[in-house]
Image (cartoon, helix red, strand yellow):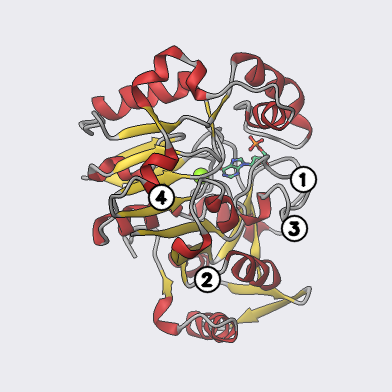
Amino acid sequence: MLAADVIVDLQYGDCGKGKVAHFLCKTKKYTHVLRYNGGANAGHTIFHNGKKFVTHQIPAGVFFGIKSVVGSGCVLDPEQFFAELKMLEEGGVDTKNKIFVATNTHIITDAHKAEDREVGGKIGTTGRGNGPAYREKYGRTGKRATEVEALKPYLLDLYQEWYGGKSVKVLAEGAQGFGLDIDWGDYPYVTSSHCTTAGALLNGLPPSSINHVWGVAKVYETYVGSKKFQPEGEIFNKIADIGEEYGATTGRRRQTNWMNMQTLERAIRLNGVTHIVFNKVDVLRTVGAWAVYDQDKKVEFKTEKAFKDFVSKRLKKLGILPKNVFFSESKDRI
Ligand code: IMP
Ligand code: MG
C-alpha cells in the first residue's frame, strides 16, 4: 500500500504547517514524513516537549522518530542541513537513521547563496540560494545530492522507498504557500518551487496515493517580501504585533492584511483541500476586529461567531465538510 496525506499552506507561508504536521504525526501512523518543495528559505517553528525548535530543511517527522525525507522537489543546502542535525541532537532529538535526502534532490551551493543575497533583494527573497539553485536545476547545470560526499550516509532512492514492497504511509509537508507558488503566486513575487499538492506528487507519489489534503491558513494574511502588501491603517501593525509576525528564517516583520476569500477559494480548489485549519483566531480576538475581503470589498463582522459562520458557509459550498474545518488558537495543537 502507498498512501499519502498532504499539508499545504493556502496563503503566503507561515500559516502554521509545522503545528499541523506535529499534530498529524502524533495522531496518525505515518511511515515517512516528506518535505516536498523549497529549501532553507522555509522556517518551521515547532514546540516539542516544551522546547521551541526552528527547522529550515528537516521535516517535522523527526520529532516523532518517523523517517524524515528531504524530497526531490526540494533544494538542499548541506551546510544548513548539518547545522540543523547538530541543533536537533543538542536539543535531545534522536536523528540517527531518521533523516534522509532523496538521491535526485538538487544542491544549493555557496555561489547560489551569494547570488541570491546580491540580486534577490528586488523581490525580497530570504537570500538562502533557492532561486539560483532551481534555475540551475532546470538549466541542467545543477548538482545533485549524490555528488556531495558528506551526504552519502543520508541518501535514499525515492522509487525504492515508495515501491519497494513495504506498506508506506507518507505525510507530505509543503513549504511556503499558495501565494508564493511559482505558477499560481503573484509572479515575480514568488518562490521558485511548487507549493501546491501537485508539488507533492513531483516526489514520486502517484495521484491515487493521496487521501487527505490539509490546507492551512490564518484568519488574516501575512506576507514577507518587497511588494507592498499591507494597507494603510494602525490596525495592521496591531495584528502583526499581537500575532508576533516576524519571520522564522530572516526575522523580518511580516506585512499583514485581512484574509482574501477569493485567494482562499483558489487555493482550496487547486490543492484539492479536504481538511482545513485556520490558525491564530485568538489574535483577531485580542485585536477586537473581524473582517475579510470578498469580491474586492471589505466585509466586517460584529462577532467572532459571525466571522466563523461566514467562512464555514463558504467552505461548505466548496465541498469541505464542517467536521473537517478547524479554528485554532496560537497555543493549540488543533
Ligand atoms: P525565496 O524563496 O527565498 O526565493 O523568496 C521568495 C519570496 O518567498 C520572498 O517574498 C520570501 O520572503 C518568500 N518566502 C520564502 N520562504 C518563505 C517562508 O517559509 N515563509 C514565508 N515567506 C517565504
Ligand atoms: Mg515559515
Residue 16 appears in the picture as rendered = yes
Q: Are marks 4 and 1 in contact (CB under 8 Å)?
A: no
Q: Are marks 2 and 1 in contact (CB under 8 Å)?
A: no
Residue extending farthest front: 165
Residue found at x 31% / y 49%: 165
| Residue at numbered disc 2 | 288
Residue 16 x/y as whole percent: 45, 54
Classify mark 2 as within 8 Å of ligand 2 or not, answering yes or no: no
Classify mark 4 as within 8 Å of ligand 2 or not, answering yes or no: yes
- Describe the element under mark 4 as helix, strand or loop: helix
Image height of 74 relative to 330, above or below: above
In the image, 54: left or right of 114? left
| Residue at numbered disc 4 | 18
Q: CA distance from mark 3 to mark 4?
A: 28 Å
* Front of the two marks 2 and 4: 4
Dot placed on the residue nearer the N-terminal end, 4 or 1: 4
Camera-side residue of 209 and 274: 209
Could you say which quadrant of the image residue 4 lies in?
bottom left
| Residue at numbered disc 3 | 231
Q: Which mark is residue 227?
A: 1
Residue 247 x/y as whole percent: 54, 40
Looking at the picture, which amino acid does disc 2 mark?
Gly
Q: CA distance from mark 1 to mark 3?
A: 12 Å
* Front of the two marks 2 and 3: 3
* Front of the two marks 3 and 4: 4
* Front of the two marks 4 and 1: 4
- Describe the element under mark 3 as helix, strand or loop: loop
Label 2 Cα neighbours within 10 Å, binned few <14 / some 14-19 / many ≥20: few
Could you say which quadrant of the image residue 325 lies in?
bottom left
